Image (cartoon, helix red, strand yellow):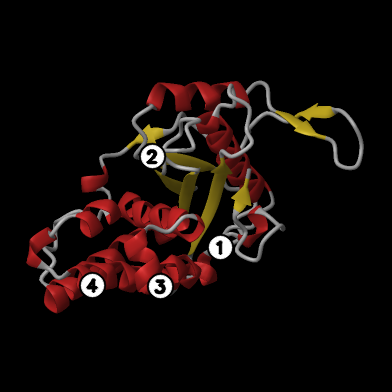
Amino acid sequence: MYFMYVDESGDPGNNTLQTQYFCLSGLVVHESEWRNLIDASQRFRRTIKQAYGFPVRSEIHAVKLLRHSAFSIEKHNRLAIMRNYFDELSKMNFLSVTNVVVDKVGKPSDFDVFSAAWRTLFQRFENTLTHGNFPGGYSRSFGTIFTDATNGEKLTGIMRKMNVHNPIPNKGQSGYRNLPIRRIIEDPSSRDSSHSLPIQACDVIAYFLHQKFKPNAYVKRSGAQNYFKRLEPILNKRASNTNSLGIVVI
């Protein structure tokens, strides 16, 4: 069984004045490696406690860390914590991260940003499971999804619909095939990010995915818009062949 933990960055509404991009990042780990992920995450917490004074049990939340004077830690050190976090995650070759970005510019007024992003992420998870392309190569394995999303009912509706009706365009010709989701089991489950280390990792990943496309002033001034690329060793590059990092851009 593969677990996918997901978090988002950006507003899912159509208003481009608020945010031009809506981003999803899904961190995937096989059940056999789950304990290794948690153990490594806890070791990292102890390290940043010693180096920066960041409390071991406090949540790593990208926006809060950069916008507020958290734990009396200098802002550049709070940024360094997240940079170091990426470096630790990139060493865990049993992880895989799938990323979806919706560019709202040019979309029709009735375009459902939220649904389009999540459908795409679910489909990429299904495809990668089907072809056995996650670390470990368990080709007969299944997957389940944990999110920090607040709109649980809508996510459940999207997944249940894809379990029955999931039209996929035919390659090189017109028309569609109905390929219902088969590898993802159960409805997406919500987790409180303050109690989930994998969800916190997704929060930081999704934040810097968004900053890669639209960095704020501080991130740009610090050169941190390039932090996302530090995750290259664990990015699911099979998710898209349109860019070198495998980011699916809609």
* Depicted 67 relative to depicted 167: above or below: below
The answer to whether residue 43 shows anywhere in this view is no
Real-space Cα separation, disc 1 to disc 4, in angstroms: 34 Å
In terms of image quadrants, where is residue 138? bottom right
The answer to whether residue 127 shows anywhere in this view is yes
Expressed as whole percent of the image width and height from the top left, the position of residue 74 reads 15, 70
* Depicted 88 relative to depicted 236: above or below: below
Query: Residue beneath label 3, please?
Result: 223
Real-space Cα separation, disc 3 to disc 2, in angstroms: 29 Å
Badge 1: few (under 14), some or many (20 or more) residues near its Cα, within 10 Å? some
Q: Nearer the viewer, mark 1 or mark 4?
A: 4
Quarter of the picture holding the C terminus: top right
From the viewer's side, name the closer residue of 221 and 186.
Answer: 221
Residue type at mark 4 is His
- In the picture, the disc for residue 135 is 1
Circle 3: element type: loop
- In the picture, the disc for residue 76 is 4
- Determine the residue located farthest toward the bottom in the rendered image: 51
Residue type at mark 3 is Gly
Residue type at mark 1 is Pro
